[in-house]
Image (spheres, rainbow, N blue to C red):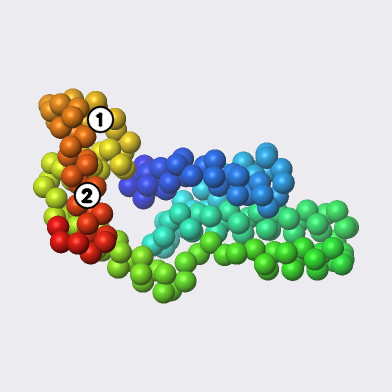
Amino acid sequence: MNSIALTINDLFLNHRQSLIHTIFGIVGCPQTAEDLAHEAYLKMLHAAETQEINYPRPFLYQIARNLALDHLRKEQVRQRGGYPSKDHEELETLIERLPANTPTPEQQADDRQQVDHMLEALNGLSERRRQILVLHKFHHWSYERIAGHFGISRSAVEKNIHVALGHLLAARDGSPF
């Protein structure tokens, strides 16, 4: 499995319940919501093969939302024998009022700038402190596991994470490192 697929896999696993809940709010059926969440995951894997995805989480939710809305449209056509009705117009109005989950171009530029700023702040940390922070926050390693990996005490791990987070917060707030 390549690194993009692993990243998408992690994203899906970390947001699976929230994604299913979001879809359930649209379709009203737990089994359909689960099926559509899985389909969204597969579509995202396929999309990642042909395009760069800068904002994977909103992209995944947008795919899921679109699948849920398509499902509603198909269900309505089936129930009505293929003929549009007044209910169809009401559904379309409701669908149009649903908020989009994709960021605006301005939000994308601002997000990119913030990410660049945080990466710069991360690069300001010592290599070991950065590794400890990444293992804890992104790979969800426990303090004990990190301590064992580096051969340090649990309290040293806590201190390193505390200092690293303080450094990042100072960078976010514009304070000097």
In primary-sequence order, the first of circles 1 and 2 is 1
The residue pinned by badge 1 equals 143
Can residue 39 be spotted in the picture? no
Q: Quadrant of the C terminus?
A: bottom left
Q: Position of residue 126 (x, y in %)?
A: 11, 47
Is residue 137 shown left or right of residue 171? right
Is 76 or 128 nearer to us in this picture? Answer: 128
Residue 76: quadrant of the picture: bottom right
Neighbour tally class for label 2: few under 14, some 14-19, many 20 plus, Cα within 10 Å: few
Q: Position of residue 26 (x, y in %)?
A: 68, 52
For the point 55% across and 47% down, the residue is 19
- For the residues labelled 1 and 2, say whether their Cβ atoms are less than 8 Å apart: no
**Kind of residue sitting beneath label 2:** Gly
The residue pinned by badge 2 equals 166
Answer above or below: position of 138 versus 124: above
Q: Label 1, label 2: how many angstroms apart (C-alpha)?
A: 18 Å
Residue 153: quadrant of the picture: top left
